[in-house]
Amino acid sequence: MGVEMGQQVLYCGVCTMPPEYCEFSGTQNKCKEWLQDNHEDVYNKMYGGDDVDAVTEKVAQVTVEGTGAEAAGGEGRSGRTFVKDKSAKLEAKLERENQKKQSSRVTVKRVERTKRKCVTIVHGLEVFDVELKKAAKMFANRFACGSSVAKNNQNQDEIVVQGDFSDDIHDLILAQWKQVPEDNIDLVEETKKKKGN
């Protein structure tokens, strides 16, 4: 009755869905390759065997024969072409998101407020799939200070930590979130200019 305790669920390394649902991800071919390379026993259960290959070939023949008349008549695209277009678009989108992550910057900025008081502002963590509210709470607990998520002038979320913790936050980000490359973290110091008389 129900799910067994301790049952392990396998997730695809490409689309992050269970292998049974990879066909809906749009990256089925890459998912199949990943599954074959990393979990050959599961791949054989799902795709292996002569029966599966024979059925797949027959379905492909029927699909090609069925859409051949439509393609010859020029009445529309075949379902197979549409699926390829959709998966190519999805793969391109995933690639763009990956490139965006690699080029994104996380800024840890120390800002002087008044006299000796300052705050540390962390911007850009959300691009690397870090939940800002959880990160702010972790900073508050770690440094025993106030920390919250606020909007900046560009209406983007950033974490504001009360106090000068820029170096400590830099080290904590690297330790806690491995998906953030060290080269993508910028330490910035912003000081108020003194007014001249």
Image (cartoon, rainbow, N blue to C red):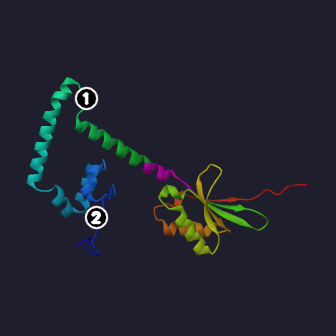
How busy is the neighbourhood of tag 2: few (under 14 within 10 Å), some, or many (20 plus)?
A: few
Nearest to the eye among marks 2 and 1: give it.
1
| Snapshot quadrant of residue 124 | bottom right
Which residue corresponds to mark 2?
10
Was residue 92 drawn as part of the magenta stretch in this picture? no
Was residue 98 drawn as part of the magenta stretch in this picture? yes
Residue 134 position, x and y percent, is 52, 66
Image quarter in which the N terminus is found: bottom left
> What type is the residue that disc 2 sits on?
Leu
How far separated are the C-alphas under marks 2 and 1? 39 Å
Image quarter in which the C terminus is found: bottom right
Which residue corresponds to mark 1?
76
User: Residue pushed farthest top?
Assistant: 73
Residue 162 position, x and y percent, is 67, 67
**Residue name at image x 20 percent, y 59 percent:** 43
Q: Between disc 2 and disc 1, whose residue precedes?
A: 2
> What type is the residue that disc 1 sits on?
Gly
Secondary structure mostly taken by the magenta-highlighted segment of the chain = helix
**Residue name at image x 34 percent, y 58 percent:** 16
6 versus 67 height, above or below = below
| Snapshot quadrant of residue 88 | top left
Of residue 180 and residue 72, the one placed in the foreground of this image is 72
Secondary element type, mark 2: loop
| Snapshot quadrant of residue 143 | bottom right
Residue 7 position, x and y percent, is 27, 72
On screen, residue 167 versus residue 93, left or right, reads: right
On screen, residue 5 versus residue 146, left or right, reads: left
Secondary element type, mark 1: loop
What span is in magenta?
97-107
